Amino acid sequence: MISRCLDVQETFHGFDSETQRREVGQYSGNAMLDIVDYIYDHFDEFRLLLDASHGTRFHDFVDRLVSMEEEYTWKWIEATGSRLEPEGELTTEFYHMMVTAYFEGIFEVVRHGMGLDDAKKYVAMMGKYHHAGFLAIVGEQAPEN
């Protein structure tokens, strides 16, 4: 899972800055739905990983995903020249909290034993919600579709 997420990030970061700016919402949304398929292909393993990994080498799984997302978000901001709100609302601490909430929200579909179709529906909605909130905080407008 970590490797899959890293591949998604590296591929996206390899795009030119205009493509990154234009495609960030669509790309990340589609990538997360692919990740949901992967999760559901390994559903039992993810239940264990999320709820029974305390004290194992996997206990920091979500933290590792959050750190990766944070790192590549700052790279995106730099690559695209995205302006941040002058009040500095997007602090590293705030963004860490939001990314953690996003990943924990995604994993709630596993914890609640949702079916794949519902999981994809809810994860897609969470992605839109997260992306719109992110754009509002960094002072960007969503691209017109």
Image (cartoon, helix red, strand yellow):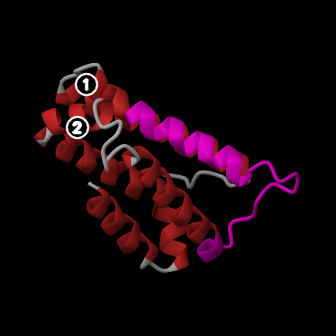
Q: Nearer the viewer, mark 2 or mark 1?
A: 2
Res. 35 mark:
none
For the point 22% across and 37% down, the residue is 46
Percent position of residue 40, x then y: 16, 37
Magenta-colored span: 78-106
Tell me the amino acid under the disc marked 2. Answer: Phe
Q: Earlier in the sequence, mark 2 or mark 1?
A: 2
Q: Is residue 123 shown above or below 99?
A: above
Percent position of residue 57, x then y: 31, 50
Percent position of residue 119, x then y: 27, 29
**Residue 36 is inside the magenta segment:** no
Specify the farthest residue to the right.
87
Label 1 crowd bin: few (<14), some (14–19), many (20+), radius 10 Å: few
Tell me the amino acid under the disc marked 1. Answer: Asp
Residue that mark 2 sits on: 46
Q: Secondary structure at mark 2?
A: helix
Classify residue 84 by image quadrant. Answer: bottom right
Label 2 crowd bin: few (<14), some (14–19), many (20+), radius 10 Å: some
Percent position of residue 4, x then y: 27, 61
Q: Is residue 115 shown above or below 55?
A: above
Report the magenta stretch's main SS. Answer: helix
- Horizontally, residue 56 falls left or right of residue 74, namely left
Residue that mark 1 sits on: 118
For the point 56% across and 55% down, the residue is 143
Q: Secondary structure at mark 1?
A: helix
Residue nearest the viewer, comparing 53 with 115: 53
